[in-house]
């Protein structure tokens, strides 16, 4: 199994991605360990806040090997290279930029670009994307997910992002979601590691119930 296939198989075991926007290097290890202890195995730190790359490096160094750590809001090939150099192996973006996707794929990173239309979805897949981030999920809704799922290749991983709550996971899974990115409902600046752990437990429990 190739490196990327291993990463995808790993992500599919627990496809809840913690979006840690505004995380600081000082709190990265504590928050990361709280998430890991609650059952999260994928963490992304968006690059549009200071200290993101340092946080990624700290998470990579402090978490067990089965934690998939990477960057979010990755808009350029330079972003991909910075995250990879820090040890990150997950590339997440809010948009579909084929050059950025291809660079992540070339570096054996798991590429999950953001898409909102079939045109973007097929462009992302053509560039080598391994999963598709459905964004913004609130405006696309269950109907948008169902429509997209009906045209992309069978087995394509679709991860809604935006406004996901523990209560909404079940209905999204019924609509065809195979994973989720979870942001401010899970972590925001000022939220303690213990609060993050409590929230994370609720999401993991909701995911497990949706799959039962």
Image (spheres, rainbow, N blue to C red):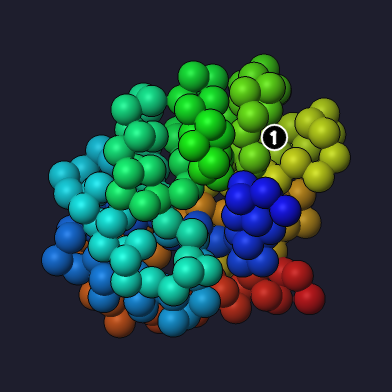
Quarter occupied by residue 171: bottom right
Q: Is residue 210 above or below residue 83?
A: below
Q: Do we see residue 178 in this rendering?
A: no
Quarter occupied by residue 206: bottom right
The structure residue drawn at horizontal position 69% and vertical position 34%, both measured from the top left corner, is 144
Callout 1 crowding tier (Cα within 10 Å): few <14, some 14–19, many ≥20 = some
Foreground pick, 140 / 102? 102
- Left or right: 63 with respect to 99? left
Q: Position of residue 99 (x, y in %)?
A: 49, 19
Foreground pick, 72 / 99? 99
Q: Position of residue 25 (x, y in %)?
A: 17, 60
- Left or right: 62 with respect to 183? left
- Is the C terminus in the top left, top right, bottom left or bottom right quadrant? bottom right
Foreground pick, 59 / 75? 59
Q: Secondary structure at mark 1?
A: helix
The structure residue drawn at horizontal position 39% and vertical position 64%, both measured from the top left corner, is 186
The structure residue drawn at horizontal position 54% and vertical position 25%, both measured from the top left corner, is 102
Q: Position of residue 157 (x, y in %)?
A: 70, 45
The residue beneath circle 1 is 144
- Left or right: 175 with respect to 125? right
Number of disc labels = 1
Q: Position of residue 131 (x, y in %)?
A: 64, 41
- Farthest-out residue, front: 2
């Amino acid at each position: 199994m190739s490196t990327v296939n291993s990463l995808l198989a790993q992500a599919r075991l627990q496809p809840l991605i913690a979006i840690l926007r505004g995380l600081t290097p000082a709190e990265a290890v504590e928050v990361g360990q709280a998430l890991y202890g609650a059952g999260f195995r994928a963490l992304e730190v968006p690059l549009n806040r200071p200290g993101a790359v340092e946080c990624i490096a700290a998470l990579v160094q402090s978490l067990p090997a089965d934690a998939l750590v990477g960057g979010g809001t990755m808009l350029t090939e330079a972003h991909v290279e910075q995250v990879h150099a820090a040890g990150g192996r997950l590339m997440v973006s809010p948009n579909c930029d084929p050059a950025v996707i291809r660079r992540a794929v070339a570096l054996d990173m798991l590429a999950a670009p953001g898409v909102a239309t079939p045109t973007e979805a097929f462009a992302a897949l053509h560039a080598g994307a391994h999963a598709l981030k459905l964004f913004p999920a609130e405006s696309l809704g269950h109907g948008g997910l169902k429509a997209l799922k009906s045209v992309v290749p069978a087995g394509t991983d679709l991860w809604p992002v935006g406004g996901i709550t523990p209560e909404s996971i079940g209905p999204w899974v019924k609509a065809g979601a195979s994973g989720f990115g979870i942001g401010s409902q899970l972590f925001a600046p000022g939220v303690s590691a213990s609060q993050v752990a409590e929230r994370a437990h609720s999401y993991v429990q909701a995911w497990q119930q949706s799959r039962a």
